[in-house]
Image (tube, rainbow, N blue to C red):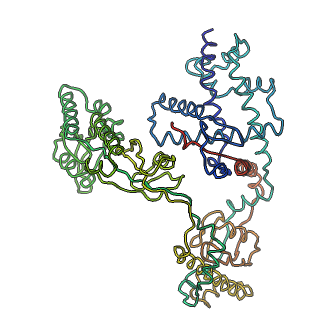
């Protein structure tokens, strides 16, 4: 009965997490696409008490927060630190899972897919879900015991399997959709053969490179004001600037105090005392050293010569006696105790073999708490007396961010801070003060400084950019004309080397024994070039092919022989590889199309979590 109670008690805890992980496992592409209809509904009006909607399917804010908190708790139980970036990553995963799950569920309903009782039972018998395999109730000596599991499955003592049944009844149809869509992808015999040829058969080719330098300094290419104006009018949407916002901020850096330095010194002296009492250097290094790389090896640094360590450390190590312990030694990394294991000369130069224990000088909990308290006081005073007045009182510098978009994740000078952007776009008035945010190196408080409404960049602002675009296009058109004329001349003789002699600025190269799927030296990698070469007979040349900002004419000199027996031996492995890749791409593209047609409203930035 205890085994069944264990399973029953854990059912509800695991179901939502499993569903999230299940749906994410089927989603190989990016996060969430789709038509953003926030602009349609009353000018980005927020949805009260909702984290978002997908085709009228609502995700309640309280449900979203519960799922998020469950994931946070799971990570913490695993000993992981959960900071703001991690929280945002989990938030994105849950939201992505919800969007995907809703869209897949719609397809399940559309095609009338369902999981039968037999399918559920056979899945449990033949392929027990991983979360059941990891249940302690079904383990013997730490390993999954199939017989114990099967006995429990076939001898239920109540409704302990109900949650598992519900989970499979829900996920198996989603899996059917996944499988059906992926199975629409297929690989032809020619695709398999082409892949084998590109990756296994060696080619000898010649290339003639027509470089951009032929036209890069052509002063005859001009751009008129009328051309610039026409380009602007035709491509005006490209110059649309969405609403952005600027933040002012002050930063309170976390720095060790004098007391933190004394604490580090006290710790290193305590270790020194324990060494004197007979404890081994290696044991104390593994317990205390904050050099994670060497600590697991008892502090071992191996052999090193002069110039490989910071100067104070090096001087102490080389001056110490063999078998002796030197320290405490202060470097920019902290305090060290150094055990000189051995000394030698190699190639006429002295070397030392040493171990060390490092105690870093870092801000302690009290220092960090005091700094957070100061930052909180600043935030309070900024709200009461003004941001500038508070900055003057606390002697901190006010800085300003670049214009931030709603999807900005990184802030220059601060790093990954999507939660700050969330504050900026939280519909609070200009001048609002944020809460105190923690970064890896300190605390930061923001003030919403400016809202820059959506607009089109003026013609004067983009004039130089447009002129450069038009000029570049004209140069490429001229380069294409030059390449075409060279091809016409060369096509008669097929002698690429002679063309390079006739036109000294062209670059001729011979490539022997190359695989087409690899990068071609001096050319790069081009699928169009690979396809063109594959279509050639020996002695033929390609049309000019654009590769980057250059054109290339290639000649097939020799194609390696295809060994049919070897090809047959590798054919199925190639088919499996191409089919898996194609199925993944097919499914991703199908799912992306569903998202692009869906009405997706992401309202997470309007809720607090």
Q: Quadrant of the N terminus?
A: top right
Q: Is residue 491 left or right of residue 225?
A: right
Q: Is residue 191 left or right of residue 130?
A: right
Q: Position of residue 404 (x, y in %)?
A: 48, 56
Seen at 56% across and 60% down, the residue is 454
Residue 306 vs residue 26, the one in the foreground: 26
Q: Is residue 481 visible?
A: yes
Q: Residue furthest top?
A: 1
Tell me: residue 450, above or below residue 283. Answer: below
Residue 339 vs residue 403, the one in the foreground: 403
Indicate the quadrant where residue 553 lies: bottom right
Tell me: residue 157, above or below residue 315. Answer: above
Residue 259 vs residue 547, the one in the foreground: 259
Tell me: residue 135, above or below residue 304. Answer: above
Label tally: 0
Residue 559 vs residue 214, the one in the foreground: 214
Seen at 48% across and 27% down, the residue is 77
Q: Position of residue 327 (x, y in %)?
A: 18, 40
Seen at 37% across and 46% down, the residue is 444
Q: Is residue 582 visible?
A: no
Q: Is residue 4 left or right of residue 568?
A: left
Q: Position of residue 505 (x, y in %)?
A: 56, 86
Q: Position of residue 519 (x, y in %)?
A: 60, 66
Q: Is residue 345 left or right of residue 6?
A: left
Indicate the quadrant where residue 279 lies: top left
Seen at 79% across and 27% down, the residue is 119
């Amino acid at each position: 009965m205890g085994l069944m109670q264990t399973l029953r008690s854990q059912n509800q805890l695991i179901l939502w997490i499993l569903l999230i992980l299940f749906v994410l496992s089927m989603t190989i592409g990016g996060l969430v696409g789709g038509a953003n209809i926030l602009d349609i509904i009353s000018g980005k009006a927020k949805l009260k008490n909702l984290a978002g909607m997908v085709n009228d399917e609502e995700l309640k804010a309280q449900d979203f927060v519960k799922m998020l908190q469950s994931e946070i708790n799971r990570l913490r139980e695993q000993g992981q630190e959960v900071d703001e970036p991690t929280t945002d990553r989990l938030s994105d995963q849950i939201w992505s899972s919800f969007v995907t799950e809703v869209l897949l569920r719609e397809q399940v309903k559309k095609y009338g897919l369902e999981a039968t009782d037999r399918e559920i039972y056979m899945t449990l018998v033949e392929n027990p879900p991983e979360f059941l395999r990891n249940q302690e109730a079904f383990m013997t000596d730490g390993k999954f015991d199939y017989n114990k599991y099967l006995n429990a499955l076939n001898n239920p003592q109540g409704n302990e399997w109900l949650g598992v049944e519900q989970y499979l009844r829900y996920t198996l149809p989603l899996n059917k959709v996944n499988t059906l869509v992926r199975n629409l992808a297929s690989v032809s015999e020619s695709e398999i053969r082409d892949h084998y040829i590109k990756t296994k058969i060696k080619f000898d080719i010649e290339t003639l490179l027509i470089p951009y330098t032929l036209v890069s300094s052509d002063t005859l290419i001009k751009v008129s004001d009328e051309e610039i104006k026409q380009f602007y009018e035709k491509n005006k949407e490209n110059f649309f600037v969405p609403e952005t916002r600027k933040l002012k901020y002050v930063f309170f850096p976390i720095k060790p105090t004098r007391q933190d330095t004394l604490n580090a010194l006290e710790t290193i002296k305590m270790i020194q005392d324990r060494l004197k009492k007979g404890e081994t250097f290696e044991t104390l290094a593994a317990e205390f050293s904050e050099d994670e790389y060497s600590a697991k090896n008892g502090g071992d640094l191996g052999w090193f010569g002069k110039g490989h360590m910071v100067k104070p450390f090096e001087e102490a190590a080389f001056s110490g006696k063999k078998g002796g312990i030197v320290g405490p030694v202060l470097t920019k990394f902290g305090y060290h105790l150094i055990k000189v294991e051995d000394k030698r000369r190699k190639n006429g130069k002295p070397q030392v073999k040493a171990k060390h224990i490092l105690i870093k000088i870092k801000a302690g909990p009290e220092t960090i708490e005091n700094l957070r308290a100061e930052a909180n006081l600043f935030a309070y005073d900024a709200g009461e007396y003004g941001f500038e007045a508070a900055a003057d009182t606390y002697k901190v510098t006010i800085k300003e961010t670049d214009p931030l978009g709603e999807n900005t994740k990184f802030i220059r000078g601060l790093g990954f801070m999507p939660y700050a952007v969330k504050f900026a776009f939280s519909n609070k008035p200009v001048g609002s003060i944020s809460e105190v945010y923690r970064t890896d190196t300190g605390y930061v408080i923001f003030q919403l400084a400016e809202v820059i409404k959506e607009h089109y960049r003026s013609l004067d602002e983009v004039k130089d950019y447009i002129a450069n675009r038009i000029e570049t296009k004209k140069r490429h058109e001229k380069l294409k004309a030059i390449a075409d004329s060279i091809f016409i001349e060369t096509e008669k003789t097929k002698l690429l080397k002679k063309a390079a002699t006739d036109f000294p600025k062209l670059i001729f190269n011979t490539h022997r024994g190359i695989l087409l799927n690899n990068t071609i030296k001096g050319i790069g990698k081009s699928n169009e070039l690979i396809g063109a070469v594959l279509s050639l007979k020996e002695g033929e040349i390609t049309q000019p092919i654009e590769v980057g900002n250059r054109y290339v004419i290639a000649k097939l000199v020799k194609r390696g022989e295809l060994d049919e027996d070897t090809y047959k031996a590798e054919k199925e492995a190639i088919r499996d590889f191409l089919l898996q890749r194609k199925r993944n791409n097919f499914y991703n593209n199908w799912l992306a199309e569903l998202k692009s047609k869906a009405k997706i409203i992401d309202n997470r930035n309007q809720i607090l979590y």
